[in-house]
Amino acid sequence: MLTPPRRARRRSGELLIIRRAQVRVLPGPLLTADEVAELLGVPKSWVYEQSRCGRIPTFTLGRYRRYRREAIEAWLEELEDRASGRLRRAV
C-alpha cells in the first residue's frame, strides 16, 4: 500500500515528489492452479472450481488466481482436523 506522496521543494524551486512504500514480503513464491493441482493430486479444473466457490484459499491478481503454499497447507490441516474430530466422535 502506498502512502500519499510527500512534497518537498528543492533550492531551485523544483517540486520533488517522494513516495514512501510500505513493503510486505510474502513468505514464499506464489503458486499457480497447475502447481496446486499437482500438489494436491487433483485436476486443475477442480482447483479452479473450489476457488470460485470459496472453498480453497486464493486471491486474484487481475485475471489470474494465485495461491500461497502456506495457506494451502493450513487449509489442508484444518480439513484433517475436522475429519479426525468426526472420526473420534464416531468411535
Image (tube, helix red, strand yellow):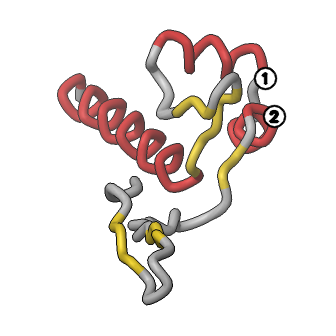
Residue linked to disc 1: 44
Position of residue 47 measured from the top left corner of the image (x, y, whole percent):
67, 22
Tags 1 and 2 in contact by the CB under 8 Å rule? yes
Residue 90, relative to residue 26: is it above or below? above
Dot 2 amino acid type: Asp
> What number is the disc on residue 69?
none
At a point 64% along the width and 27% down the height, the residue shown is 62
Question: Farthest residue toward the front?
Answer: 12
Residue 70, relative to residue 83: is it above or below? below
Residue linked to disc 2: 34
Position of residue 37 measured from the top left corner of the image (x, y, whole percent):
75, 33
Which of the two labelled residues, at mark 1 and mark 2, occupies the earlier sequence position?
2
Image-based side of 85 in relation to 55, left or right? left
Nearest the viewer among 68 and 24 is 24
Position of residue 48 measured from the top left corner of the image (x, y, whole percent):
67, 18
Nearest the viewer among 68 and 40 is 68
Quadrant (top left, top right, bottom left, bottom right) of the C terminus: top left
Crowding at mark 1 (Cα within 10 Å: few <14, some 14-19, many 20+): some
At a point 39% along the width and 67% down the height, the residue shown is 22
C-alpha span from label 1 to label 2: 6 Å
At a point 43% along the width and 89% down the height, the residue shown is 11
Nearest the viewer among 80 and 1 is 1
Dot 1 amino acid type: Lys
Nearest the viewer among 10 and 74 is 10
Image-based side of 65 in relation to 45, left or right? left
